[in-house]
Each structure stands twice: as structure tokens, then as C-alpha cells.
Image (cartoon, grey):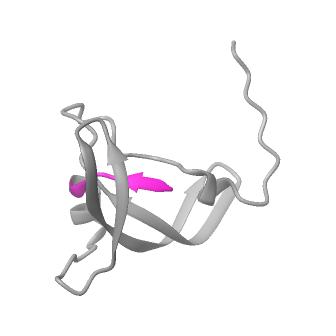
Amino acid sequence: HTVITPRLAKKLGVVVTKDTPRLSIITANGYIKAPLVTIDRITIGSADVRNVKAVIQPLGDDLLLAGLLGMNFFEGMDLTVKQD
């Protein structure tokens, strides 16, 4: 799944309520239930994906880290990873 930090969720105006669905995930600290939301649109370069499901979860203290793109973002795309 795609993950966004609570900080980014707030910046995007995503509101989590008691009725927001939760997804059970495994973290380094064990199982948790994280809010599962839908991001209207994520655009990176020429990739433009709408209605991306994302889990809201802290990813540490690095302010530059706002999230992680999951395979649900890349669905239907050809993906090439270059190690250089």
C-alpha cells in the first residue's frame, strides 16, 4: 500500500474520524490498525494516478519523508529500477 505521514495527510486536508476504515498492518513494533484513506490524485512526472488508497502512518522524524508509493500506485505501469 501507499503510505502517507500524518503531517502530509493534514497538509492535504485529509480528515480521519472514528468511521474512517482501518487496515491491519505489521510494523517494526508489531500489528497496528492504521487509517485507510483515498487520495484524489497523485502526480509524479508523467505518472498521474487518481483515487489512490493510502495508509496514514508515521515514518520517522525526517521532515523530507512524506510517504512511500506502494504497488497500488504503480498498478498497470511498467516499472524499471536503475541502480545508478
Q: Nearer the viewer, residue 62 or 34?
A: 34
Q: Is residue 31 left or right of residue 51?
A: left
What is the residue that sits farthest to the top in this orientation? 84
User: Does residue 74 lie above or below 52 as drawn?
Assistant: above
Task: Give the image location of residue 71, x and y in percent.
Answer: 62, 52
Image side of residue 84 versus residue 73, left or right: right
Pick the residue in front: 7 or 17.
17
Quadrant where the C terminus sits is top right
- In which quarter of the view is residue 9 placed? bottom left
Which residue is rendered at x = 23% and y = 87% of the image?
19
Horizontally, is 4 left or right of 76 in the view?
left
On the image, the x and y values in percent for residue 40 come to 48, 75
- Looking at the image, which residue sits at the far front? 30
Q: Residue at x 26, y 73 (%)?
A: 13
Query: Which residue lies at the image location 22% right of the left edge and 35% below the top edge?
Result: 60
Q: Residue 16: x percent and y percent?
A: 21, 76
Is 71 located above or below residue 27 in the figure?
Answer: below
Residue 9: in magenta span: no
| Residue sticking out furthest to the right | 78
Q: Is residue 23 left or right of residue 30?
A: right
Residue at the bottom extreme?
19
> Which contiguous range is marked in magenta?
1-6
Q: How many marks?
A: 0
Front-most of residues 13 and 55: 55
Residue at left offset 35%, top offset 62%? 24
Image location of residue 15, percent across then percent down? 22, 77
